[in-house]
Image (cartoon, rainbow, N blue to C red):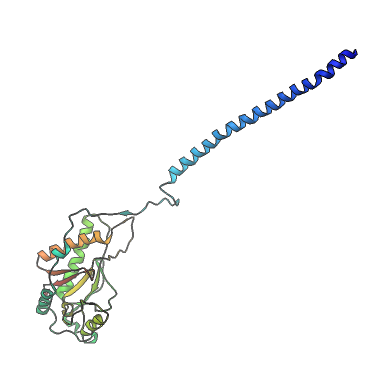
Amino acid sequence: MTKRQKALIILLTPFLLGFLLGILVGGGCSKHERVRKEKPAKTEEIVEESTETEEETSDDVEGTGESTAKEIIYYTKLLSYPKEFGDVNEVHLQKAKAIGLSKIPPTRDNIDTRHLVRIEGNEYFIVDDLRYSVPYLTRGAAAELQRIAKAFSDSLVSKQFPIYQLVVSSVLRTEEDVTRLRKSGNPNASDNSAHCYGTTFDITYTRYNREEETDEFMQPYELTKVLAEVLRDEKKAGRILVKYEKKEHCFHITATQTQ
């Protein structure tokens, strides 16, 4: 090899090395870019799979397989309770004196149970925790309470509504009970109330009892629509007097029959 050939090889060697290095670097970058381009497509697939899973389980967040409770609405014309049940207390008292106990019991120890029926809860109603009254009524009033409670239950069944029991919140009051009630600050407590003669009872319209829970339920104001229909029918039949007590949250009911 001549000196001229050696000099030519030395001159061309840097160019050849640079060309080969460029090919190697360019090939590596192209391969890296292909990988980076493929990654977003893979991420989109994961997002789509996650969305499908979310849609499938949206109705069962806790994974229990149970559906949420369903509220039942009674779509009917709403009665005007104050107008429909406006029998004033004087009328209740007059009827109670005429057919009820001849004498108001001074204390609970003085109650003569021979002419009264002890009121106990059953499948149609429950008796609330009584603080200012005792669970006794005349036979006529006891029969009327049972009639109202059963009619309420029958109406729920016929309408295919969930079954609830009525809550009796007040019954017979002695003179001692009236005194205690007045001291508690109740402005409606009277020394001479229809409750004192065993003919009168209160049914609350803000609470209803339920023994068995189901997936369906009703709000108290929906159940009161059903109760109001029962009381309206009983009132039209002449079997009861009714006063809608807004402050006391109850229907104040006096039976008009002795049996």
Quarter of the N terminus within the rendering = top right
Q: Quadrant of residue 101?
A: bottom left
Q: Residue at x 87, y 16 (%)?
A: 6
Q: Position of residue 46 (x, y in %)?
A: 52, 38
Q: How many marks?
A: 0
Is residue 154 among the parts visible in the rendering?
no
Q: Quadrant of residue 197?
A: bottom left
Quarter of the C terminus within the rendering = bottom left
Q: Quadrant of residue 157?
A: bottom left
Q: Residue at x 13, y 68 (%)?
A: 86
Q: Position of residue 151 (x, y in %)?
A: 19, 63
Q: Residue at x 47, y 41 (%)?
A: 51
Q: Is residue 46 above or below residue 130?
A: above
Front in this rendered view, residue 174 or 239: 174
Front in this rendered view, residue 198 or 90: 90
Front in this rendered view, residue 147 or 95: 95
Front in this rendered view, residue 189 or 95: 189
Q: Is residue 254 left or right of residue 211?
A: left
Is residue 71 among the parts visible in the rendering?
yes
Q: Is residue 63 above or below residue 233?
A: above
Q: Position of residue 203 (x, y in %)?
A: 22, 69
Q: Position of residue 235 (x, y in %)?
A: 12, 66
